[in-house]
Image (cartoon, rainbow, N blue to C red):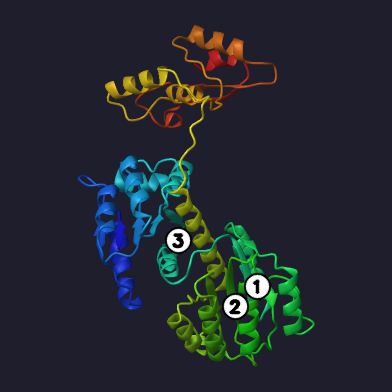
Amino acid sequence: AFISQSGAMCTSILDWSLQANVGFSSFVSIGSMADINWGDIIYYLGDDPKTKAIAIYMETIGDARSFMSAASEVAFTKPIIVIKPGRTEQAAAAAASHTGSLAGSDDVLDAAFKRCGVLRVNKIREVFEIVELLGKQPLPRGNSLAVVTNAGGPGVISTDALIGSGGQLACLGDDTMAKLNDLLPSHWSHSNPIDILGDATPDTYARSVELAAMDPACHGVLVILTPQSMTDPSKTARGIAEVAKKVGGAKPILASWMGGQGVTEGREILDEAGVVTYDYPDSAAEMFTYMWKYSLNISHLYETPRWCAEMRPDQAVDVIIANAQSEGRTILTELESKQILSAYSIPTVQTVLAMTAEEAVSAAESMVLPTERVVLKLNSTSITHKSDVGGVKLNLSGPEQVKLNL
């Protein structure tokens, strides 16, 4: 199922799906969510037997509690993949002008997605690539990948992509290295990525992939093929398909058959065997890392936050929240937020509320040492982004500068 806050995104994806032969159980455009929220739709699709995965284009989260409750429950049985723009200040402003809502703190959203089993991706194509991959390959138990390639360059590129996205190269054991030494020519790479050289036969490919997959330190295998004069892309693909059957769904196997018409048949063979193929090895490496992150997020659903015996906030927390609710507010002031954090023994920057200019100057005198600076900030229950209205002054060296900036 695909849900989007952008109608134009829907029409584009739908047009693409007809060409790519991709089907949807549901296709929903919800705009600014005037009468329903993400939780309503996720619960509905979670109960829909035709829906196997849920892909979301989200510009604002809306009712966060509803979203997290629904996602936490549905993510146990169906992958939920979100592309959420607004990481940069400019993109967040564009999202606000589009849906009329604030994009929200990106770091907070990342943490929330991880906690409720949702996988966040960065590109539109990645939404559908990861849905396909999760449907065909098992989840890795770690982030260590073995790369088998017949060319050095693609192996290096995939390594950069893997490390940059949060994965790592598997450190192959001595037993695996010894067997690879017996199998491969003396001038193979002798490391991971496993460069089996340009004249590698289909049997050499298959055996190398099998050895890598059997290594306990390896959580997945990426197989890269470049069409060279002695390469047989189709026969090699058949060999890899057989290895995938032997592995038996214990570890994910991904492939990058680089090239055009010459490798088309090989890609089709791998696709039929459930081995997802990519045009470029860096994309495949990033997809492996996404699989690991998704696996990690799902494991978080089984964790229960430990209650700390020393964490006994007083009634001030209830008073702060009750006061905000009585005023019809959904956002706490900065001071209120820090008071709640302090009640739970979470360190915060020293903050003083000054009701007059004299109180502000006095507070600065008591706080500032010769080498320190203070920040003067507007305290408001209605203005969220205070810097937009000139309500933040930074790097004030002492009481005099505080007085001048009031």
Give the residue displayed 45% in from the left and 41% down from the top.
304
Give the residue displayed 38% in from the left and 20% down from the top.
320
Please name whichever residue, 27 or 316, is drawn nearer the observer in this view of the structure.
316
Please name whichever residue, 270 or 35, is drawn nearer the observer in this view of the structure.
270
Image quadrant where residue 389 sits: top left
Q: Nearer the viewer, mark 2 or mark 3?
A: 2
Residue under numbered circle 3: 123
> Alpha-carbon neighbours of circle 2 within 10 Å: few (<14), some, or many (≥20)?
many
> Alpha-carbon neighbours of circle 1 within 10 Å: few (<14), some, or many (≥20)?
many
> Alpha-carbon neighbours of circle 3 within 10 Å: few (<14), some, or many (≥20)?
few
At label 2, the amino acid type is Ile
Q: Could you tell me residue 288's position as x and y percent?
A: 53, 65
Q: Could you tell me residue 36's position as x and y percent?
A: 22, 47
Most distant residue in the left direction: 35
Q: Could you tell me residue 52's position as x and y percent?
A: 33, 65
Residue under numbered circle 1: 155
Is residue 250 visible to us here? yes
Q: Left or right of 15: which side holds 247?
A: right
Element assignment for label 1: helix
Q: Left or right of 261: which side holds 71?
A: left
